[in-house]
Image: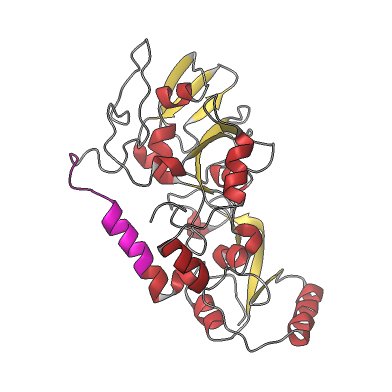
Amino acid sequence: MIGLGFPYEGPAPLEAIANGLIFLNPRFDPPHSRSNQAFFAYKPTSRSLTSQHPYIENHIGEPYSYLVDMDNETQIRLTIKRILTNISNGTYRPHEFTPWGFLERLNAYLSRQNICAAPFYKNLIQSPLPIAKADAPPKFNYLDVPSTTVSWPPASSLKIVLGSRGKSCVDVCMNLGTSEHTLLLPSNISASSIRNKTQHPQIQNGYLYYRSIYTTPPQNLSYLYTFRCSPEHFPSVNHRLNLQHLGVSCPNITYTTSPMAPYWDDATSSCVFQASHEWFDCTASGTLNESDVFSRFCPCRDALPNQISLCSNCL
């Protein structure tokens, strides 16, 4: 099956792979985004797609799918030769797209969330972290939460990271294992212990043990233990006292409606928090103007093997 570059992220390539076909996934260089594609121009997203189907690129890959530059005839010919040399009749369907995987997500969402107990305006934007006390009262607005009422996703799944300048939270979380970004932790916990625990998760008894044996192994193992940006946890990051608990001092505090917020402004030594929950964005990167480049505060979490939309302890 040959991808033509559009539609983006459609179901047809996944269906083709599940039925034994090989998908040629067009690579986008530069990535497709609002800045260069009319399709995204008026859509409220900061995403940059590196291929027609990023999920297949990152989570499936060869030998079921091959990235190709559709303008490079030589690469296309070489890729076709590789496919014909290593052709197989195998099929592959990720666990997430099986009935079991769908019901697993549905059960987690319906049984773990309580959207009826809190007033409607609080919705699911409250912080699941316990808010630490401080001598000076913080500046509260409707995004700040004085009490803990949301318990899922569990607070234990959250890792707050100060990214390097100009990076999106997607990139920050994916590269958390490197020294490029700063994992924010209380003084009694080391970063190495967190990373080692994530790289070598313990298999528990019961359901998690059962699924580790009987689910289809993920195709791209290198992508299995990477962290992911967790937008559900942005309200926890968007709170002065939570950052203070992790050793971040905010001499100055401002609020803005920008997809980059919350972020650290080094020029003014300010913590810039999000003023509207509708602007929380994992994919925003770069600058807000020509001169200023900021470091984002990012909510990162691990993922349950074969189920990237759930954290490892979300079940």
Residue ID at (54%, 33%): 296
- Numbered range of the magenta stretch: 103-119
- The relative height of residue 40 versus residue 248 in the rendered view (above or below) is below
Residue furthest toward the front? 205
Residue 87, visible in the rendered structure: yes
Nearest the viewer among 143 and 220 is: 220
Q: Is residue 279 magenta?
A: no
Q: Is 137 positioned to the left or the right of 246 in the image?
A: left
Nearest the viewer among 70 and 263 is: 263
Q: Is 209 positioned to the left or the right of 99 in the image?
A: right
Q: Position of residue 175 (x, y in %)?
A: 64, 45
Quadrant of the drawing holding the N terminus: bottom right
Nearest the viewer among 216 and 4 is: 216
Nearest the viewer among 273 and 292 is: 273
Quadrant of the image occupied by residue 154: top left
Q: Is residue 107 magenta?
A: yes
Quadrant of the drawing holding the C terminus: bottom left
Residue ID at (63%, 81%): 22
- The relative height of residue 80 versus residue 7 in the rendered view (above or below) is below
Residue furthest toward the top? 135
- The relative height of residue 312 versus residue 57 in the rendered view (above or below) is above
Q: Position of residue 310 (x, y in %)?
A: 43, 56
Residue ID at (70%, 71%): 70
